[in-house]
Amino acid sequence: MTGRQLVACLREITAHNVAIVASRAQRRAEEPAPPAEVEEPETKPIRRLKPYILVVEDDGDLRDIIKQELCDCGYIVKTAKHGIEALEIMNREYLEPQRYGAEPRLPSLILLDLHMPQMDGMNFYATLISKPQYREVHVLAMSDSQSIGEFSDWCVQTAGLDVDEVPEGLPKPVGFGDLVQKVARLAGLP
């Protein structure tokens, strides 16, 4: 086949294809339009946030160990050295989150040392329960057994809580198996 014959053949094929395409387009134009598709609204997946634990402990080594243990279990953990710092964290994350580009969020659980400088656990807890927005946050008190007993008595006698509203206690030295078990029960699993 010569070059001229090839070009002629290609022109004939092209003309034939154009006719077929035009014929199909005309048939589509004559067919009734299919019903309009109803566009479903876009649904966003429900975002389940991991439980957030606030550890309030003045002993830096113990604070770091607890944070690491809970992070290893999948929790989001923030720490504070004393009650004043803990209240600042809570206010920042719950009352003023828009300043930091975040959504309001309260801790699922506060692990609270009862003996700290600047603001101890009892004064922190008194402040916490005096604010309606913080009253529902679970607290796990950590200290020696005698201090936990005194804290429980104070909650009932001075703070006016019912016995079943008194935060649980976890005696020091903290057993991490017990800690993780109580955290999972009070804050939920990550």
Image: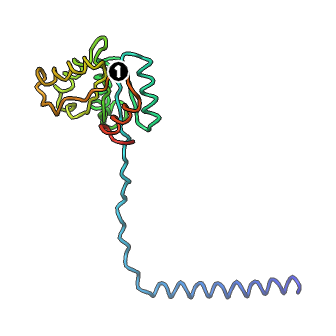
Residue 28 pos. (x, y %): 49, 84
Which quarter of the rendering shows the C terminus? Answer: top left
Which of the two residues, 107 or 180, is positioned nearer the viewer here?
Answer: 180
**Residue found at x 37% / y 32%:** 178
- In the picture, measured across the screen, residue 92 lies left or right of residue 3, that is left
* Residue type marked 1: Lys
For the image, the number of numbered tags is 1
Q: Quadrant of residue 50?
A: top left
Residue 124 pos. (x, y %): 24, 20
**Residue found at x 40% / y 80%:** 34
Which residue, as the protein is rendered here, is positioned at the far top?
117
Find disc 1 in the rendering and name its residue.
172
**Residue found at x 35% / y 19%:** 57
Q: Is residue 4 above or below residue 174?
A: below
Which of the two residues, 93 or 72, is positioned nearer the viewer here?
Answer: 72
- In the picture, measured across the screen, residue 70 lies left or right of residue 122, that is right
